[in-house]
Image (cartoon, rainbow, N blue to C red):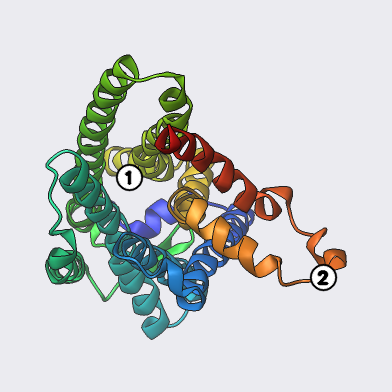
Amino acid sequence: MTTVQAVMANLTAMERQVLTAVNTGGSSLSLVGSGFIVLCYLLFKELRKFSFKLVFFLALSDMCCSFFSIIGDPSKGFFCYAQGYTTHFFCVASFLWTTTIAFTLHRTVVRHKTDVEDLEPMFHLYVWGTSIVMTVIRSIGNDHRHITRLGTLCWAQAGRAGKAVHFVTFYAPLWAAILFNGITYFQVIRMLNNATRMAVGMSERAYQSDARPDMKAMSRWGYYPLILIGSWFFATVNRIHDFIEPDHKIFWLSVLDVGMAALMGLFNSIAYGLNSSVRRAIHERLDLLPESLRRWFPKSLRSSGQQQDSELIPLKVENQQ
């Protein structure tokens, strides 16, 4: 049975430095992006709604996952455990929070239920409880006498058995979450598409222009499952390849593996966090600044309030008629 040390022997010192730089750079971007969403939630009271609270916990998980991905030190046993297990815990929690967002949207839009806020304790039990169980099971399948690192992360795997446990406790629930999110968003988008067609067919042009923001939202929801796929596709392929051919390491695949996984927090913060409510809250604060300072900010932030008003104009006209 080939050991992890033999696998790492195929990587040169330069290749390890490259992977470390890629991981640190990507994780730093994710840390900043997810930290920004957490900060917005804490500072702006109007964002403290149930839907954005789920985004807050998603960003918090991403922030912790990115932080521990950066600080791990394989030369020290304690810090190696800290990186390996806390990164595993918070990364699992991250993609599980995306399933609660998908479930909430499906329950509200498709099933027309209004009790989603009552399910918050169950969401926490489901996310944190599952993350703890997956992390504990992974620790049982590891050989702590042989601490090393795979790529830029700290692992304690005992050959094929340890790799199999890692795959079962991380990649299996990950792709189950991807499948659940894909099916859920497909049902939501299909129902809203059907409702929009029926409404447009029964309404005048004023409603057609009013439906455009909904169509933008639907197209955005379709990209949510792709975030997890894009972030973890190369990592999954790399784990499978490493399990089948442990003596042959593909460096470019490892770079894509580490880089895309490290950027997951940044992708989530952009897709889930930077919505119209966040931009509007930032815009309202920017209005308090002098014009000489406001011009340094992107136009998308300075004009978001005006865009939001323009989206409401058709609705007002329709109500007046």
Please tell me which residue lies in front, 256 or 225: 225
Q: Residue at x 39, y 73 (%)?
A: 83
Task: Name the quarter where the C terminus is drawn.
Answer: top left
Question: Whole-Å distance between the Cαs marked 1 and 2?
Answer: 53 Å
Horizontal side of 268 relative to 84 (left or right) equals: right
Locate residue 195, reporting x and y percent. Answer: 25, 26
Q: Is residue 130 visible?
A: no
Horizontal side of 164 relative to 84 (left or right) equals: left
Determine whether the residue tagged by mark 2 lies in a helix, strand or loop: loop
Locate residue 293, reporting x and y percent. Answer: 83, 67
Residue highlighted by disc 2: 290
Please tell me which residue lies in front, 151 or 169: 169
Horizontal side of 129 relative to 210 (left or right) equals: left
First of labels 1, 2 by sequence position: 1
Residue furthest top as drawn: 201
Locate residue 280, reporting x and y percent. Answer: 56, 58
Q: Residue at x 41, y 42 (%)?
A: 227
Q: Nearer the viewer, mark 1 or mark 2?
A: 2
Q: Which mark is residue 72?
A: none
Residue highlighted by disc 1: 239
